[in-house]
Amino acid sequence: MALSRAEAARIAELARLHVPESELDRLALELSTVLDFAATLNDLELGDEPLTAFAPAEAPLRIDGPDGRTLNDGEDGVATANAPEAEAGFFLVPPVVEDLEP
Amino acid sequence: MSPVEPWQRSARSLAAEVRAGRLTAQASAESGFEAPAARWERDVHAILSTDRSARARAVAEAPMQAVLSGVPVLLKDNLCTVDHPTTCGSRILGEWRSPYDATVVARLRQAGAVVVGKGNMDEFAMGSSTEFSAFGPTRNPYDLARVPGGSSGGPAAAVAYGLVPLALGSDTGGSVRQPAAFCGVLGLKPTYGRLSRYGLVAFGSSLDQVGIFARHVGDVADAYRVLAHRDPFDASMREGQAPDVSTWDAGVRDLRFGWPANLWREGVDEAIVAALERAAGWLEHAGAKRVPFEFLPGTFAVATYYLLATAEASSNLARFDGVRYGLRARSDELTTLYTHTRGEGFGPEVRRRILLGTYALSAGYHDEYYLKAQRARTRIVREYAAAFARCDVMLLPATPTLAFKLGEKTENPLAMYLSDVFTIGANLAGIPGLSVPMGLAAGGLPAAVQLLGPADSELRLLQAARALEAEGRSDRVPRGYEREFAWPGK
């Protein structure tokens, strides 16, 4: 199947990934090539095969509290140490809520 | 003949020398950074980061009476370390420093190993040639015009040229076994859930597994024994004890090895077919029995994988958004901050895969792509189960070709993906696989074979690899080292 330029742009938007206009055509073509190849799975006549999972049937649990290895064990600032912008233990981002003035 | 230098030794022999006090851990850990191995790094570029003081600290902290005492180890740069940066071969992580060691790294350190640095890789482990590293490619030490494979190309090349006897990579679709094959070293992808993934930066969580590179089968066994333990920090670990691999040298008498010759009837290099015939002959000579059968072509596995792995990647890589770590594009608006940080921070292959995965999961296409691929995965799991009802291990190629040239496949994503046609199935089925070097083909490039087995068959894989090693001496190192390390041939 051939993916259109508009579809490629829409996927990029969904993925929160900026793709320059000049690269959209090429990208649509590359994705189409792989999707065409993926269509070979139609030859397998899969019917209603179940889905696969390897995770253990029951999720293992561990103590819900400080255990000496997690990051919030009193090591101030460890979680925000790598942040591009942080203040007082919080990550800083541009304003999310628009101006609320009437 | 000159005595064997530390950089030429196996991990087992280095650790034994260190434990006995005949070699200092310092001399052992630094051996690959001195001539002649050091000359190779300038051409090969296997290392992304290392520094002498971090190595010295690691030596000082290593226990001296342990399994891997003093053994230098290079880690793929998607394994978190407190004493080196972790870049994943990407610009998007910037100057990020992990606040913790991955569990496998902590286990190596407890066993006396010395982490000497971080190895080059395709960005976020997406690639088969290490050309998609944001920090420049690694080259194959056997031919600098060719790729070392990928995505764990740095660790594979480093073990091949003699920097270290042991390295860790990660294998989501063949990223340990394929570069091991291209570089002429052993590469083990363990059973899914046997090695902790805690601290391995996630790509495809249902497929990722930490893997082991070495030049000697005994070294792979020792590393596996150190690493294969349960970890409460990885909820996807397999239940029960990991297999005991201490009898890796016990031989292959009466082992039944599957021989799915339909897989290499076409499209596989002659040198690799010859290596398979040679390996089968050696296994038979050692007492194993060949069981011929037909097997599902690997192209179905590739198609399945590039829907599932990309879907998982699109989700896993959502965390790189310029807020908690790494690069941040300048913006006074949040959505633009996300889109531009990601657009600028990710390289071409990572972008392709995130978009492909986003598409496979998007409304209206989820059933057609993602669910269909999940059903195909179940079919592939069943194909392997049926095969392993008839044999103990399967012998097949690790790769369809010998190492290819730099630039040969970077512009053609599908061609690059198809270089994993023989390795991807094991990740989909969660089973272990091992690339075994079979010496050099005409032209001087390494040729390899692959062994696959059912879940928890690591011991059988190692025993079969050991039989091939004993027959053929698979401990050869690259051109330029012939005087020190001869391949006796067979």
Image (cartoon, helix red, strand yellow):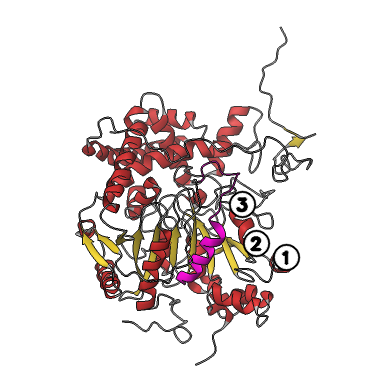
Q: Which residue is mark 2?
A: B109
Q: Secondary structure at mark 1?
A: helix
Percent of width and height locating residue B201:
56, 47
Depicted A21 relative to depicted B200: above or below? above
Check residue B28 for magenta coloring: no
What's the distance in space between the residues labelled 3 and 1, CA to CA?
Answer: 17 Å
Q: Amino acid at mark 2?
A: Arg
User: Badges 1 and 2: C-beta atoms under 8 Å apart?
Assistant: yes
Pinpoint residue B342: horizontal percent, then vertical percent. 55, 38
Mark 1 and mark 2 lie on one chain; the one further toward the N terminus is 1
Q: Amino acid at mark 3?
A: Ala
Q: Quadrant of residue B401?
A: bottom left
Labels 3 and 1: the sequence-earlier one: 1
Toward the viewer: B15 or B138?
A: B15
SS for dot 2: helix
| Residue matched to label 1 | B61
Q: Chain of mark 1?
A: B
Measured as percent of width and height from the top left, residue B83 is found at 69, 58
Proximity of marks 3 and 1: CB atoms separated by less than 8 Å: no
Residue to which mark 3 is pinned: B102
Tell me where residue A2 sits by quadrant: top left
Q: Amino acid at mark 1?
A: Glu
Question: Quadrant where the C terminus of chain B lies?
Answer: bottom left
Do marks 3 and 1 share a subunit?
yes
Chain of the residue under label 2: B
Q: CA distance from mark 2 to mark 3?
A: 11 Å
On the same chain: label 1 and label 2? yes
Q: Is residue A55 left or right of residue B115?
A: left
First to last magenta residue range: B216-237
The local crowd at label 1, few if under 14, some if 14 to 19, many if 20 or more residues have their Cα within 10 Å, is some
Q: Is residue B108 visible?
A: yes
Disc number for residue B323:
none
